[in-house]
Image: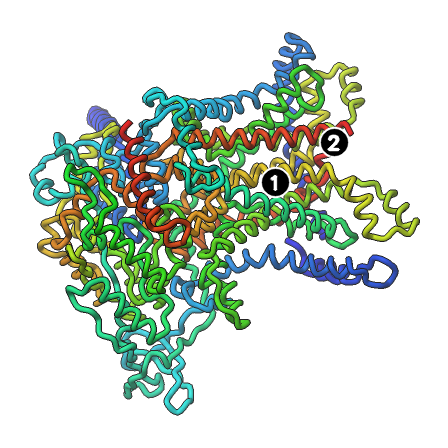
């Protein structure tokens, strides 16, 4: 009797403690969007985290990208946001982030490996808000099979945009390809080559100064290319404002000789193009000032309004570990936003030689990115500049306004919006 | 669903309709052509959508597009571990041979004859055409549905649609009852008020409604999606117009029998207004099922996502995954098509008889 | 069709059998308190009781936000909550109306606002006129003695059930450079047409898709009107030997006119509010050729990095005034019909 009573007492006590522990489980919510398979990779990592940390449960809320861009700022402003979010407007949402520094075990690790990117998240301070889920670099791809078929030499490293324009037009003429050159319809894409042409983007005090000689040179080139058929009207002209439009479908369909995009296309090309033709990443073409693309990427940021900062820090530190990140980048075929991994290289989960070559090309481009590009990427209101650039340039290309007017409108758009945001 | 023989019979009988004794008036010819054309124009785009949703991403990017979803045929060839893609190759002598491709290098393909696998031929890639067969890319549907908690999204959508419709029917019919059966001071002012709300598109008041909802503490609950749209001016109008046709004597008689106003509403007017109520119910179901923008803003926890929000979450920043978009569009269409098929009788007679007189 | 309708009738009866008892109980439960209220406030005030829930919802979720919108329009800055925003008075409205010449959007400070007004005006001119025309034709066709009339009505009504996003996606898919319409053109020997690159084609398709999606709704309204016309009038005309055309213009059209007016004004209001379909179909392009006024408001408030709620609210107030005038027109027209 006595022993069974003791057993009963012991087991009830155990049960109560277990229940207590279970009910003390913290629930964290991570807002996420997908370009490819990142959601699945992240979910498997989170599942492992939950088994090793049973007191924390993490829910991945996958939303359309539109929600991250347009709804998240409103939700954060109203105090209804998640605990962690995958964001692309790194500096723009800076006021809502959580400073993990006081809660981290090893802040020095973060500074060593994520150093420059922390500035993107917190331009005005030195907080540690999160890490990059991927680093992206803009740069061109070519359809090398078409070059072979047309028997045209592929321009080498150091070639200028003019060289490339001539070469792709030759290929397109020989093989009757409808679109010699295609660019993503995005100010971010134009910015890299514009900087290569000498655009400085900022004035001496560090305030935005969008329209200068370099930018005008690049805009003129894009305008002329649309006029002479190097670039097809149908891509940029088919939407308005700052709407993003990629040319991945046309490129995958072998309708494009050269496609100015970026490193995030690698997983998608590997799966949709496969080995149908040789899609080949080439080094950034040069201008008078530099041979550069634009860095970018999305980051996983902790949100300041969270009710569980300690648990958020635990989760973030787990995810930021070198082996976890190596697995994440390797599976998603993203360029690492971790300086240690970028230096040592990671094993990408692909046996496609084209993907491997592209990853190597873009990774090698990271050190050559111009400091102006870094400054622009780190500027919190950079989307104001990108949107003004692409929307007004497009109106000029379509013929609604003259190029001169477009420059004036770009400036006035930027001035008006920045004035509103500083009120 | 419409019985095929019935349709055939109706088409047949339609072809024999005449106006004017025995001869075809130009209006008859025009009628047939118009109906046929209308049928094609209204349904063909949807049929094309459904067919396209079964194509693989590479098949989707083909031009000219094939009508039916086709996929490549692979064959097992002796001496090779993986199955190889089959192609129709135009040989130098003009004949067409079926060869399997080992690999492609640059602009030449290494191919073998499946029957004589020892000899490797080097074929230029522009002389070969893939051999294809009908193949439905079910993975376009399977992948997103597996990735997402489809059942939970479906359940949420169903709850929102049903609860919202019940609330809408109740409060709008009560308002319509008040505005049609009674003569009272301020009736016209209220009518103006209700019409006024008709002209405000929700896009314009998104942010203030969001703040109201936040202050009421409804964020991330399904009520935030159910309540804001419950009172619809269109609903009030539809029902009021219909209720105006109810003979006043019935009401008076009921009052003579000492029936309470609520009893008159519930027992007399509502049953008579059933056709219009059914129409409003169908509209409400349709509107709620299709709502996207508002739920996306107000819900950010995945367990409360409705179907439209959940199924659109594969839209990333940088990629347009057409095969998934098409497949998921078809999935969200299925309930609409079911509603349509079973209730089209109510819709078309109900709205016609609610008359907007 | 017949046995399908029978099955539906049976389903309706079965549903009634199931639902009748609980509904009856619910009625009895509610009758008690509501009758008490009736005794309290008297029959004359009962309409207000019935109106109350609806008015409460309208007030809270429509009128209050509208008033907040008005408040936003006199503020500036980027804060979400009204109390944090600096008051700017009529500045936002001045920005909107700051134009060199109202005829030329390019001379305006907010050129896209005026372009939006210009584009919307063109859109409703074509969309409303063709919508009414085709609704009328379809209603006339459907009014004839054809078998399975319910089926044909349903055919034309089907697109109304689709969400605007689905409608736009379906047609975008068809109109792409490599879409099936271009495949058809190429197959008959013509060149491909890049519909989304030409401003004229983009506007054409915006109008076309909008009509495709809503035709059925207006058709049914007109059909109801046609069916309300007394058949004796037609019989008398036929006995007199009147030609079909005269019958149409002298009898049908005048009697149908009140319904036509409802259709015209409703289509106008919905046309001015057009957004979802066109936004997904053309994105407002090429350039700004199909950017309409609601898209301008949406872009200003949401898609720009600087979410300018003040300016967007001011623009939506202007839009509201325009729609209010349109709506008053409908009310006046309806009243004339009810009296006449």
Q: Quadrant of residue C266?
A: top right
Q: Which mark is residue C337?
A: 2
Q: Nearer the viewer, residue C41 or A172?
A: A172
Separation of marks 2 and 1 at Cα, in angstroms:
18 Å
- In this rendering, the answer to whether B98 lies above or below A216 is below
- Whole-percent x, y for residue A125 in the image: 14, 32
- Whole-percent x, y for residue B279 in the image: 64, 38
Q: Earlier in the sequence, mark 2 or mark 1?
A: 1
- In this rendering, the answer to whether A322 lies above or below A11 is below
Q: Say what secondary structure mark 2 lies in.
A: helix
Q: What residue is shown at x 34% (from left), y 20% (from top)?
A: C83
Where is mark 1, residue-wise?
A: C267
Q: Quadrant of residue C296?
A: top left
Name the residue at the bottom extreme: B93
Q: What residue is shown at x 74% (from left), y 49% (from top)?
A: C140
Question: Which chain is disc 2 placed on?
Answer: C
How many callouts does the rendering have?
A: 2
Q: How are the residues colored? A: rainbow
């Amino acid at each position: 009797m006595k022993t069974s009573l003791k057993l009963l007492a012991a087991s009830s006590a155990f049960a109560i403690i277990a229940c207590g522990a279970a009910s003390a489980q913290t629930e964290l919510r991570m807002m996420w969007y997908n370009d490819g398979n990142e959601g699945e990779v992240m979910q498997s990592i989170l599942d492992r985290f939950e088994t090793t940390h049973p007191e924390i449960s993490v829910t991945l809320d996958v939303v359309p990208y539109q929600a991250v861009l347009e709804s998240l700022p409103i939700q954060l402003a109203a105090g209804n946001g998640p605990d962690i979010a995958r964001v692309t407007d790194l500096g723009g949402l800076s006021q809502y982030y959580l400073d993990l520094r006081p809660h981290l075990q090893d802040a020095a690790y973060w500074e060593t490996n994520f150093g420059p990117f922390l500035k993107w998240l917190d331009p005005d301070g030195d907080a540690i808000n999160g890490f990059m889920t991927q680093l992206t670099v803009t740069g061109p791809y070519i359809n090398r099979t078409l070059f072979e078929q047309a028997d045209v030499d592929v321009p080498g490293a150091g070639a200028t945009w003019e060289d490339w324009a001539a070469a792709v037009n030759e290929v397109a003429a020989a093989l009757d390809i409808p679109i010699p050159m295609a660019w993503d319809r995005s100010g971010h894409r134009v910015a890299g080559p514009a900087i290569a042409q000498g655009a400085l983007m900022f004035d001496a005090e560090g305030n935005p100064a969008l329209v200068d000689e370099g930018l005008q040179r690049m805009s003129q080139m894009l305008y002329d290319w649309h006029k002479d058929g190097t670039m097809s009207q149908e891509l940029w002209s088919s939407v308005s404002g700052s709407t993003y439009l990629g040319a991945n479908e046309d490129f995958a369909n072998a309708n494009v000789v050269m496609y100015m995009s970026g490193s995030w296309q690698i997983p998608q090309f590997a799966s949709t193009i496969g080995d149908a033709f040789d899609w080949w990443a080439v080094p950034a073409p040069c201008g008078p000032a530099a041979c550069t693309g634009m860095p970018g990427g999305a980051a996983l940021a902790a949100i300041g309004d969270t009710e569980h900062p300690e648990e958020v820090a635990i989760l973030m530190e787990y995810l930021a570990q070198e082996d976890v990140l190596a697995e994440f980048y390797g599976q998603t075929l993203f360029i690492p936003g971790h300086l240690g991994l970028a230096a040592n290289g990671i094993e990408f989960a692909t046996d496609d030689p084209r993907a491997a070559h592209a990853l190597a090309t873009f990774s090698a481009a990271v050190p050559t990115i111009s400091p102006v590009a870094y400054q622009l990427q780190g500027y919190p209101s950079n989307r104001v500049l990108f949107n003004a650039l692409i929307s007004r340039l497009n109106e000029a290309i379509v013929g609604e306004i003259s190029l001169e007017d477009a420059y004036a409108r770009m400036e006035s758009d930027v001035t008006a919006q920045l004035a509103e945001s500083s009120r | 669903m419409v019985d095929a023989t019935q349709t055939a019979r109706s088409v047949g009988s339609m072809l024999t309709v005449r106006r004017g004794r025995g001869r075809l008036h130009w209006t008859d010819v025009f009628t047939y052509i118009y109906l046929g054309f209308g049928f094609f124009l209204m349904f063909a785009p949807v049929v094309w959508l459904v067919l396209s949703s079964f194509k693989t991403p590479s098949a989707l990017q083909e031009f000219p597009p094939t009508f039916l979803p086709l996929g490549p045929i692979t064959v097992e060839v002796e001496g090779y571990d993986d199955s190889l893609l089959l192609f129709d190759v135009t040989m130098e002598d003009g004949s067409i041979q079926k060869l399997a491709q080992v690999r492609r290098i640059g602009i030449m393909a290494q191919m073998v004859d499946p029957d004589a696998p020892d000899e490797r031929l080097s074929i230029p890639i522009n002389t070969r055409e893939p051999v294809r067969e009908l193949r439905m890319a079910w993975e376009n549907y399977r992948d997103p549905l597996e990735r997402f908690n489809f059942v939970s999204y479906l359940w949420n959508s169903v709850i929102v649609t049903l609860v919202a419709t019940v609330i809408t029917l109740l409060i709008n019919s009560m308002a319509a009852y008040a505005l049609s059966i009674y003569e009272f001071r301020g009736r016209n002012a209220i009518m103006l008020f209700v019409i006024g709300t008709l002209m405000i598109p929700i896009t314009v008041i998104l942010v203030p409604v969001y703040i109201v909802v936040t202050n009421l503490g409804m964020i991330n609950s399904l009520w935030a999606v159910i309540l804001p749209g419950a009172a619809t001016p269109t609903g009030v109008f539809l029902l009021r117009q219909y209720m105006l046709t109810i003979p006043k004597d019935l009401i008076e008689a009921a009052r003579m029998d000492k029936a309470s106003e609520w009893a008159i509403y519930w027992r007399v007017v509502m049953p008579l207004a059933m056709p219009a109520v059914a129409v409003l119910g169908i509209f409400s179901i349709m509107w709620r099922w299709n709502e996207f923008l508002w739920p996306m803003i107000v819900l950010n926890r995945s367990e409360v996502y409705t179907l439209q929000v959940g199924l659109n979450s594969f839209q990333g920043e940088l990629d347009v995954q057409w095969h998934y978009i098409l497949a998921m569009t078809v999935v969200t269409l299925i309930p609409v098509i079911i509603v349509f098929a079973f209730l089209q009788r109510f819709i078309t007679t109900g709205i016609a008889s609610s008359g907007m007189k | 069709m017949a046995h399908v309708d029978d099955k539906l009738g049976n389903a309706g009866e079965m549903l009634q059998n199931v639902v009748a008892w609980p509904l009856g109980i619910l009625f009895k439960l509610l009758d008690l308190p509501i009758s008490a209220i009736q005794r309290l406030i008297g029959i004359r005030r009962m309409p207000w009781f019935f109106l109350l829930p609806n008015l409460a919802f309208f007030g809270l979720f429509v009128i209050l936000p509208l008033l907040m919108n008005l408040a936003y329009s006199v503020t500036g800055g980027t804060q979400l909550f009204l109390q944090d925003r600096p008051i700017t008075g009529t500045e936002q409205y001045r920005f909107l109306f700051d134009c060199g010449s109202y005829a030329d959007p390019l001379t305006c400070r907010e050129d896209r606002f005026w372009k939006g007004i210009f584009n919307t005006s063109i859109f409703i001119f074509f969309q409303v006129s063709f919508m009414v025309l085709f609704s009328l034709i379809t209603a006339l066709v459907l009014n004839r003695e054809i078998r399975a009339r319910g089926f044909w009505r349903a055919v034309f009504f089907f697109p109304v059930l689709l969400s605007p996003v689905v409608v736009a996606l379906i047609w975008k898919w068809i109109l792409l450079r490599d879409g099936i319409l271009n495949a058809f053109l190429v197959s008959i020997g013509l060149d491909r047409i890049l519909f989304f690159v030409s401003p004229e084609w983009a506007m054409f398709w915006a109008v076309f898709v909008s009509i495709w999606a809503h035709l059925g709704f207006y058709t049914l309204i007109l059909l109801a009107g046609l069916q309300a016309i007394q058949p004796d009038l037609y019989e008398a005309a036929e006995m007199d030997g009147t030609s079909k055309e005269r019958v149409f213009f002298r009898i049908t059209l005048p009697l149908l006119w009140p319904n036509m007016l409802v259709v015209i004004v409703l289509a106008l209001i919905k046309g001015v509010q057009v957004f979802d379909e066109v936004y997904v179909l053309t994105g407002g392009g090429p350039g700004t050729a199909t950017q309409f006024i609601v898209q301008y408001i949406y872009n200003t408030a949401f898609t720009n990095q600087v979410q300018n709620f003040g300016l967007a609210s001011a623009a939506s107030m202007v839009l509201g005034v325009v729609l209010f005038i349109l709506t008053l027109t409908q009310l006046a027209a309806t009243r004339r019909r009810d009296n006449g």
